[in-house]
Amino acid sequence: MKDVKKTKVRWRKIHVDLPENIHRRLRVRAALEDVSMQSLVARVPVRAVRDVRLPEESGKRSLGKPLRIETGSG
C-alpha cells in the first residue's frame, strides 16, 4: 500500500450572530443528529466552497486539485 502524506489542516475561528430562534433550532437539530453545534454549523461553509479551487500556494498544491476538508464527527 502506498504511503499517503496527511496534510495538517490549520483551523480559523469565525463569529456568527444568529437570531435566537435560529440558534435554538440549530441546537435542537444538533441534538437530534447527536453532533455538536460546531460540527453541524461547520458543514455549511464546507458545502458552500466544495467546488472552489485555490490558486497554487508556495508549491504545496497545484491549481485545480480539490481541497479536502475533514470536519470531524457528524
Image (cartoon, rainbow, N blue to C red):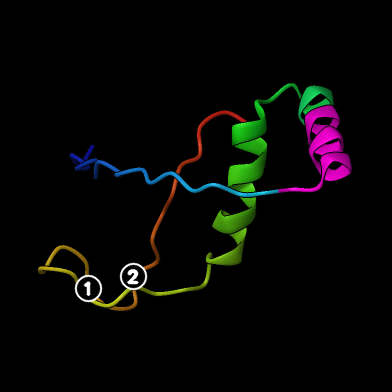
Q: Main secondary structure of the magenta part?
A: helix
Q: Is residue 46 depicted above or below 22 in this figure?
A: below
68 is higher (above) or lower (below) than 21? below
User: What is the three-letter code of the residue carrying label 1?
Assistant: Ser
Pick the quarter of the image with the C terminus: top right
- Residue at image mark 1: 62
**Looking at the image, which is closer to me, 14 or 51?**
14
Q: How many marks?
A: 2
**What's drawn in magenta, residue-wise?**
18-29
What kind of residue is marked 2?
Lys
Number of other residues with Cα within 10 Å of mark 2, as a class: few under 14, some 14 to 19, many 20 or more: few
Element carrying mark 2: loop
Asked if labels 1 and 2 touch by Cβ distance under 8 angstroms, the answer is yes
Mark 2–mark 1 Cα distance, whole angstroms, equals 6 Å
Corner quadrant of residue 73: top right
Residue depicted at x 24% and y 40%: 6
